[in-house]
Image: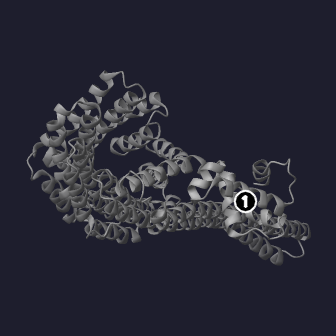
Amino acid sequence: MQLPLKKLSGILFCLLLFFKSAEAQKIYIDSLNHLLAQNSISKEEKVNLLCKLAKANFEKNLQLSFQQANEALKLGEGLKDGKSKAMAYATLVHLYVWKKDLKSAYASLDSAMYYTHKTKDRVALGFVWFRSGWLDLVNDDNDKSAAKLLKALDFLKGQHTDDYESTIYHYLASFYGYGNDPSKQQKYARLCYVSAIKSKQMDLLNNAYLTIGQTYFDRFKLDTLKRNLLDSALFTYKKSLQLSKKQEGRMLIYSNTAAAALNTANVYFQYFPPSYRDSAEKYVDIAMGIATKTNLLEVLLNCYGLRSEYALRDGNYDEAEKLLLTGLGKISGSIIKMPLTQARIYQGLASIAEKKGNQQAALNYLKQYFNYYKKAFDEEKINSTIRIEAQYQSEKKAQEIAYLHQQTKYTKKLNVFYIISGLTGIAALLLLLMSYNYKLKASIRKQELIDQEKRAAELRAQLKEVEAMQLQTEQVLLRERQERLEKEVLASNLQIEEKNELLELIPEKVNIESHLSLDEQIKRIVNQQKRMDKEFEEHKTDFFDTNPAFFERLQEKANHTLTRLDLKYCSYMLMGLTNKEVSIRLGIEPKSVRMSRYRIKQKLGLGKEEDLNLFLQQLG
């Protein structure tokens, strides 16, 4: 966000340019506070300063950032132009996402969009559309996000907002990463760097180095024979780290530096021989130091995970397990919940326990894995509901705002027409004998007014119909998403039931007379279960595409004679599992599966020559 006062901005830039010590960040914030305390600046300029302070403080003091953004909002209350309130609400969007409060983030975005209709300031309009696109990016809606970010660039073009433009180019480059479109990724990464240089902001330059490094790394992963790309990625990551060290006092955001350090350590771990371990450890230490200071828990856990992988390479399973448990301990008291990350950590612990031969510990870790995975699933389900509801309310408010603006324009025209008609009527009364022809014209105008009102009523009726159709479409979308969630729950329940049945059948599957030890037999059973899980994941996608009314139609075909076990058989057949695979999952003989298929065909009234699998596929 740029300050309107060029003179004051120049003073602030000079302060940032010459102070390079660790106190420079404090001087930057103190400079903003000093400018804010001056009586000579306007309310609009104070709003801009408060928004800058909120952005500068959010990583270390989120509560203070909220106070400053809300103060900016209060200052904007008395201003006629909507620029200040649009900027303040857009700043709150970023803070609420950082707080993981999507509902409030969407509410703030609605308010910001409302005030964009009350200003023509292109910087404010560009900033609001930037935050709107960024919010879509947070929700993995890349298509909508890209369109909004490009619209933001249109507003910001020629406005000397290199800081915003550099960040937008960074996000656009990320859309085409991971091999999606390397040429476009390179294009936007280059623009990100050029804009960062123009902005003279160290945080943006650091972010640009990280973006360029990622383009090299993504291209290397497409062709790992091109080691020059990997060397370029490492070189760029290290430039980011060197910049962060040299300009430490001018940095406000440390997450990019932590990411560059962790990426560098990962490169050494994955693509360099063990002799480079010291290099990897060096960059892990840098990432851990930043993560500890700034509460970047995801980065911290990844650091412990990387060190655990090195311990596994050395065959030191106890150390690998200790490192992962230490990482879990670091986040145990955190208010930020990361059930999916914790589930993955417990999955790694189960693997380590299995390699150690401690099957009981492995089973305990697996239970924790399933518990946290279920929490992550429930959390995602709740977040999806909140996100859909927030998007619905946002779109609904946007329609209401558009209607109100249209209604306001219509009312103004109508009022003008009423005034003209009133003046005409008064003139007609005063000149009654001389204005018979004039009264006739007034009558015609009155009829035109009635026609206009009728057209307005028809327009309102059409608008209500459109709103009803949109609501119906949104409800269909909600039902489709709910149905997919139900399918995922059904598939997950099948897996959980198999795990429970496996735990119950382990004593029966263990052969005391076998030449294999008890641990080896349990290990063989667990490995067999892993292979089946892998096969299950390959078949599960087809199952998710099944019509949710499949089981209802199946029961109708069988006159509601199918048991729950019959339906489970049908689920596995629909996924494409063979008789042998079904028998292994259920712990029964293949012969029993064939008998069950025969029984199900009889209940469905199928002939001997009819294929049950084909019938289920057609019905689904």
Report if residue 559 is visible in the image: yes
Q: Quadrant of residue 294?
A: bottom left
Report x, y in % for residue 92.
Answer: 38, 64
In the rendered view, does 560 fall on the left or right side of 486? Answer: right
Q: Nearer the viewer, residue 323 or 126?
A: 323
Report x, y in % for residue 597.
Answer: 74, 56
Q: Nearer the viewer, residue 185 or 93?
A: 185
> Which element carries disc 1, helix, strand or loop?
helix
Q: Quadrant of residue 600?
A: bottom right
**Which residue in the protein does label 1 denote?**
596
What's the residue at 33%, 54% (across, down)? 354
Q: Quadrant of residue 403?
A: bottom right
Report x, y in % for residue 230.
Answer: 30, 27
What's the residue at 48%, 57% (across, down)? 119
Report if residue 4 is visible in the image: no
Q: Nearer the viewer, residue 615 or 597?
A: 597
Q: Residues within 10 Å of mark 1 (few under 14, many from 20)?
A: some
Report x, y in % for residue 45.
Answer: 30, 59
Going by the picture, which residue comes out furthest to the front?
513
Q: Nearer the viewer, residue 137 or 546?
A: 546
Which amino acid type corresponds to the residue marked 1 in the rendered image? Ser
